[in-house]
Each structure stands twice: as C-alpha cells, then as structure tokens.
Image: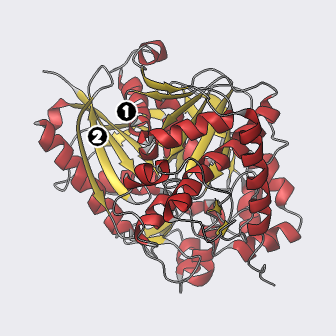
Amino acid sequence: MSKFILAFDQGTTSSRAIVFDQDGNIKSVAQKEFTQIFPQPGFVEHDPKEIWSSQSGVAIEALTRAGLGANQVAAIGITNQRETTIIWDRKTGEPVYNAIVWQDRRTSGMCDRIKANGHAKTFLDKTGLFVDPYFAGTKVKWILDNVDGVRKRAERGELAFGTVDSWLVWNLTEGQVHVTDASNAARTLLYNIHENRWDEDLLKILDIPASLLPRAGLSSEVYGETLGKSFLPRIPIAGMAGDQNAALFGQTCFQPGMAKNTYGTGCFLLMNTGETAVPSKNNMLTTIGWRIRNRTEYAFEGSIFIGGAVVQWLRDGLHIIETSPDVEDLAASVPDSAGVYFVPAFVGLGAPHWDPYARGTIIGITRGTTKAHIARAALEAIALQSYDVLHAMELDAGTPLKELRVDGGACANNLLMQIQADVLGVPVVRPKVTETTALGAAYLAGLAVGYWKSRAEIESQWSIDRTFEPQGKPDQIEKLRAGWEKAVKRASRWEEAEA
C-alpha cells in the first residue's frame, strides 16, 4: 500500500493541508480562510479554536480528496505562522485570550522600555533578534500583565504557552505533548540560539515563568501520535518548523549562501549560513534554520511585514481590483509607475529598518496618476523591500547573491518576478512545486520516519518551472532604488512613540 506525507500549513490568513507523495509531488490540497480580528489600530488577533478547527478540518478534507485513510499516512509535518502567541489552560485546553498575531504592534511601548533599560544587546547576543513587537516574548508578557488572573495561574503552573505549532500538537495529541521545535523557539526572544535552550536571564527580564514553556525539540523527530475521535488516530507527528524555515528547507537551500524569498502575507527572505550563527552588522536577524540530529544550521533572515497583503489591500481596501491575480494585468497596462512610490508600512517597517512607528505612504502622485500606476507601485514596493533585505544580507555574508529562489502565492505573478529580477540584478528562480513551505514540513517529517532516506534524495526532486533573468536598464533601476529610499524616509517614524 502506498504511503504519503500529510503537511499542515497553518498560515496567517488560512489553514491548509497538502498531501505529498514520495516524489515530492502534490496529491491533494484543502484550504480554509479564518477570521482576522482587529480590536483596535495596531492590534491583530486570531481565535485559537478557529485555528485548530480550520486546520483539522482541511486535513481530513485533503485526505478525503486523495482517497486516503490514516493507515496510508506515514507521518504529519507541521509548519506554521511564527511568533503568533497562544496561552491556554493545561487541564481544559481553553485559551486564556485570543492568539496575538505576529503582525500585532501593541507591545511597541514595552519594547521601547526594554531597550531604554539597556537590555537590547543581551537579547541580540543570546537570540540573534532585535527587541521588537514582532516576536513572541513581549506578547506573552502582555497577556500575563493584562488579562485578569492569568499571571497567578501561570505562576501556579496551570497554563501553557506555545506558538501555533505547539498549539496544534497539543490538540492533535489531546494534551499529551507540549513541544515546539528549535526554529519556532528561536522566534520567541526567550531561547538561546547558541546553547539551544530556554534562557533564564531572558525569562527574568520579561518576568515570564519557565513553567509556561514547551520542550524545545528538533525540527525532525517523532514528537508523538495523533489521538482521539476528532482526528485520524495513530499517525506520527514527525516534523515541525516555522513557515519560513520550512520554505528554506523545501527549496533545498542546504548550502551556505543559498537564499529564498517567500511571497506571502509578508515577504520573508532567508539565507543559509551553515553551522555558524553569523552576527549581522546590517540589521538582519540571525536565527536557527532548523535542527536535525542535534546539528543546528543557522540563517540570516529579513522579514518584510507587508508583501502580498498590499495586493489584498488594493482589493479589499481600495477596491481597484476584484481578485488578487487581477493586479498583474492592471500593473502591466502601464510601462512604469510614473514616479509613484508606495511604502506599505501598514504595521511599521521590518528589516532592515525595524521601525514600528512607520506608516503606509503613497507619494509622487500627480493628476496623471491612475489606479494602474498605484498597482504597479505596489508590486515594485514588494520587490524593492526585498532588495533592501537581500542587499543587507550580501553585505553581512561578504559574498554576492547568485540567484534567488522564490515561492509563496505571489510568486505566480510573472510581472512581479520580472520586476524582482530587474531590481536585484540576479536571476529569480521559481520551482515547479511552489508550495515549498508545506513541502519543507513534509520533508522534515519524512526524514524522521525514513520515508526519505537523505537530503541528497530530497535535493534531486527540486526542479525549475521558470527563471526570470534581469532585463532592467542599470540607470533606470538606480533611479527607482533612489526614489524608493526617499519614500521610505518620508514614511519612517510617522506615529509618535509612546511615552
């Protein structure tokens, strides 16, 4: 009987499940969007129960579409939106508050105070991360400090914290397993990436009880088995990585210097740096790529908070397109953006700026500006933000980028990919299987149970759909970059910092 791998891809706006065969090909897919909750400006939340119900539902749907039973699933791999923070009751499994999403900026003032107290270098040295609202640690502290009774319950050991991977495993195993992997733990501001352990000094600074924390495991190991009537029983849960780390693995970027960009809600660029946690001099994050067989491999990361979400805003906010794919034809109807720049700092700016107080800006508008120019400027913004990050990575790595491997929903936009190649000046390579986030989770799970024997076997499966070669004229590209730099300065620190 043929066996398959089931990958959970729990994202920011939807939950998906994908069934992969032994050749790394997709056999079936199921997807369900879930509610985005915006209690007030800068706050972004999800209902943890809806995350679980949507993810378990699409998993069963994907298996049903593929005509598979539980006995035909060799393992489950999980990849997830990172940094999103959930705290729940260990006995009942009830969340104490909504999930605080990675995009949420409510802890900006808290981060400012931590930095003012001189702790920024401690966090950077131990975690490779900047003190920023993006990461989970300050979200945990916010829940402990602001939800009635939660801190006392946490101090009594009654509560559990986890990123979304931990929450899914807890539910899959009916509360038997409380675990995360190193790649997710590395995004919490609580994990020492050099010593691979939760760090007592960081927990003390943030006043977070250690009893809340999951076990930090490998990215490829059998964590437990599915239990209960609500899900297909006795399937090993065997691979886990944050979505961007999983995509780097799924793109088979196994050698130092190889890089990928995932064009999702945000854009996330990772470059493999091997077994060395290289400190960045250019505002990149140093993070764990994955941990397999007690061998830790590291990466540079640059996070762009608003990538594909800018296209969603053109659709849902401005209503200048009906569907997201419509943006390509609209943007292609003009030869350029006619001097219009769009800085989509809706929730601040990520790497390399790290400015939580920046806000969205459209600049350079004239009477001749049309919705097509704004659409083109939106696509250029995605590419230009990516250039800023990759240029900083090149400086840190000391070697020029040879090519950029791409994935995520927006990489299907050929115009965007061509603009990206032009702006970068290197080939942009799109693989045949662009679901590399889920594929990476599948590979990690498959390696743990012997479904795939080696990385070499995995590497042989990666194949190219299309390569976009740079076509831009150097003077025009330089002008575009210079205008972008000016526009970013206009958008920076628009909001006043909290006192």
Q: Is residue 208 left or right of residue 248?
A: right
Q: Residue 177: in sight, yes or no? A: no
Q: Single out the mark in the foreground, 1 or 2.
A: 2
Q: Is residue 72 left or right of residue 348?
A: left
Q: Is residue 128 left or right of residue 434?
A: right
Residue drawn where x is 44% and y is 62% of the image: 312
Residue 455 position, x and y percent, is 48, 17
Q: Nearer the viewer, residue 171 or 54?
A: 54
Figure coloring: secondary structure
Residue drawn where x is 39% and y is 67% of the image: 48
> What is the secondary structure assignment of the residue under circle 2?
strand
Q: Are marks 1 and 2 in contact (CB under 8 Å)?
A: yes
Alpha-carbon neighbours of circle 1 within 10 Å: few (<14), some, or many (≥20)?
many
Residue drawn where x is 56% and y is 57% of the image: 378
Q: Residue 71: in sight, yes or no? A: yes
Q: How many marks?
A: 2
**Residue that label 2 marks:** 18
Alpha-carbon neighbours of circle 2 within 10 Å: few (<14), some, or many (≥20)?
many
Q: Nearer the viewer, residue 429 or 446?
A: 429
**Residue that label 1 marks:** 442
Residue 483 position, x and y percent, is 76, 54
